């Protein structure tokens, strides 16, 4: 039986570093398997000019604040950093964390980030092409740059449900797939990913299936749909009761 894992996404918005750091310590102490932030430059909710911190810098801090949980960004925007640079940043955080990094990555979507930081937004196909070009560059650098990553292969998490490109890239490169199911499509998308695995010659069992949720309702339903890694979105003020419930649910699932 596949073991269930649980994680928390702590968005670095509308908070202070002291509060954020304590939240990271608290969720690890509660027993989550994974801790994620996100990769944006401005808040996605609330005051659009509120406090916000950069993802990869914060991820480096998360590495020093934790000792056990795997850590990552859900997800890094490929367009914000040269792929060779991103590979080096990821490898460095991998070393700082003692081999606990997950490189979450996606094509990008938040137009304000692009506009205010001077990046070319382009079209969704443009950004997906850039992602498809970046992934082999990133993985090649991990094979050739020194020092090598702590783990022989840093896990790549790809987020999204695009059936023609995103799920194909997931089948080719990812160790974890993440999807936020707004309209009951998780089971369908999961099957499409399995079909892409067959087409590219990949064992579907090699890809962990993760799901982003925002409460502890219907967790069993997502497991029935194929998810084995439930990631709960949180936010300031941090709800540690919900995280504790999530961990208790995982423990019950894994004892069954």
Image (spheres, rainbow, N blue to C red):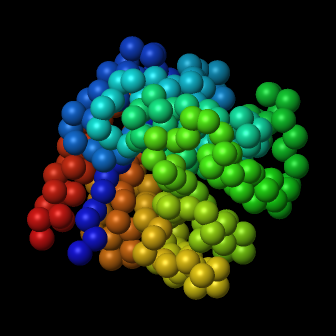
Q: How many marks?
A: 0
Q: Which corner quadrant of the image does residue 79 belong to? A: top right
Q: Which corner quadrant of the image does residue 3 belong to? A: bottom left
Q: Which corner quadrant of the image does residue 16 belong to? A: top left
**Can the viewer see residue 34?**
yes
At which x and y percent is residue 247?
21, 49
Q: Residue at x 61, y 63 (%)?
A: 173
In the image, is residue 183 above or below residue 60?
A: below
Q: Quadrant of the C terminus?
A: bottom left
Give the side of residue 72 with respect to residue 57, left or right.
Answer: left
Relative depth, front residue between 125 and 50: 125
At which x and y percent is residue 25?
29, 27
Q: Residue at x 35, y 24 (%)?
A: 65
Give the side of residue 167 with respect to residue 238, left or right.
Answer: right
Relative depth, front residue between 55 and 71: 71
Q: Residue at x 29, y 38 (%)?
A: 68
Q: Quadrant of the N terminus?
A: bottom left
At which x and y percent is residue 105?
61, 49
Give the side of residue 40 with respect to residue 69, left or right.
Answer: right
At which x and y percent is residue 125?
83, 61
Q: Residue at x 38, y 68 (%)?
A: 227
In the image, is residue 35 above or below residue 186?
A: above
**Can the viewer see residue 13?**
no
């Amino acid at each position: 039986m596949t073991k269930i894992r649980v994680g928390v996404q702590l968005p670095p918005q509308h908070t202070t570093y002291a509060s954020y750091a304590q939240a990271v310590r608290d969720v690890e102490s509660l027993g989550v398997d994974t801790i994620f932030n996100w990769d944006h430059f401005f808040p996605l909710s609330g005051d659009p000019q509120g406090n916000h911190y950069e993802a990869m810098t914060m991820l480096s801090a998360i590495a020093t604040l934790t000792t056990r949980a795997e850590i990552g960004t859900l997800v890094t925007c490929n367009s914000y950093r040269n792929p060779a640079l991103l590979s080096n940043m990821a490898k460095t955080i991998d070393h700082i964390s003692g081999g606990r990094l997950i490189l979450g990555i996606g094509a990008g979507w938040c137009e304000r980030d692009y506009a205010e930081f001077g990046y070319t937004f382009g079209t969704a196909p443009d950004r997906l092409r850039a992602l498809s070009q970046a992934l082999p560059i990133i993985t090649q650098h991990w094979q050739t740059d020194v020092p090598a990553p702590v783990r022989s292969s840093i896990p790549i998490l790809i987020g999204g449900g695009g059936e023609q490109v995103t799920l194909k890239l997931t089948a080719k490169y990812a160790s974890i797939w993440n999807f936020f199911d707004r309209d009951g499509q998780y089971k369908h998308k999961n099957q499409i990913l399995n079909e892409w695995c067959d087409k590219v010659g990949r064992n579907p069992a090699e890809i962990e299936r993760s799901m982003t949720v925002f409460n502890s309702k219907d967790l069993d339903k997502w497991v029935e749909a194929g998810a084995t890694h439930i990631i709960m979105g949180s936010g300031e003020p941090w709800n540690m009761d919900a995280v504790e419930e999530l961990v208790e649910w995982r423990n019950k699932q894994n004892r069954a």
